Amino acid sequence: MGNLKQDLSHDQPCKPRACAIQDCLQKNSFNEDKCQAQIDALYECCNAFYQAQGDQASTLSCPKANLLRLKMKQRAQAAEKQ
């Protein structure tokens, strides 16, 4: 996984991070719990993408801006409970 600036400037923004999730899932028998760092990294990239390009922008690697923010909020709440 590259740095954030590289991943944002990819021809499909955040794609390297989305691919990292798929690689992790395949290596871990599709156990999502073992790929949380990769998921967080994708969400970080997507959030930066929307901040730079606006909520109406789109890339295949990211959920829509409103769904991304909801997922980030849910993940933060779940982390607080642990």
Image (cartoon, rainbow, N blue to C red):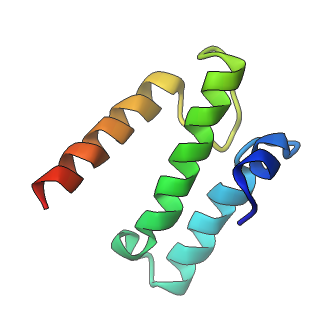
- The residue sitting at 30% across, 36% down in the picture is 73
Name which quarter of the figure residue 82 lies in. Answer: bottom left
Please tell me how many numbered marks the rendered image carries.
0
Q: In the figure, is residue 48 to the left or right of 65?
A: right
Up the image or down, 62 lies above or below 75; here it is: above
Up the image or down, 37 lies above or below 9; here it is: below
Q: Nearer the viewer, residue 30 or 43?
A: 43
Name which quarter of the figure residue 1 lies in. Answer: bottom right
Q: Position of residue 58 (x, y in %)?
A: 69, 26
Q: Position of residue 5 (x, y in %)?
A: 77, 46
Q: In the figure, is residue 78 to the left or right of 25?
A: left
Whether residue 60 is visible here, answered yes or no, is yes
Q: Position of residue 14 (x, y in %)?
A: 70, 47
Up the image or down, 77 lies above or below 3; here it is: above
- The residue sitting at 41% across, 30% down in the picture is 69
Instruction: Report the residue that reaches farthest toward the right.
Output: 11
Up the image or down, 61 lies above or below 16; here it is: above
- The residue sitting at 54% across, 35% down in the picture is 63
Name which quarter of the figure residue 67 lies in. Answer: top left
- The residue sitting at 53% across, 27% down in the picture is 64
Whether residue 57 is visible here, answered yes or no, is no
Q: Position of residue 81 (x, y in %)?
A: 11, 54
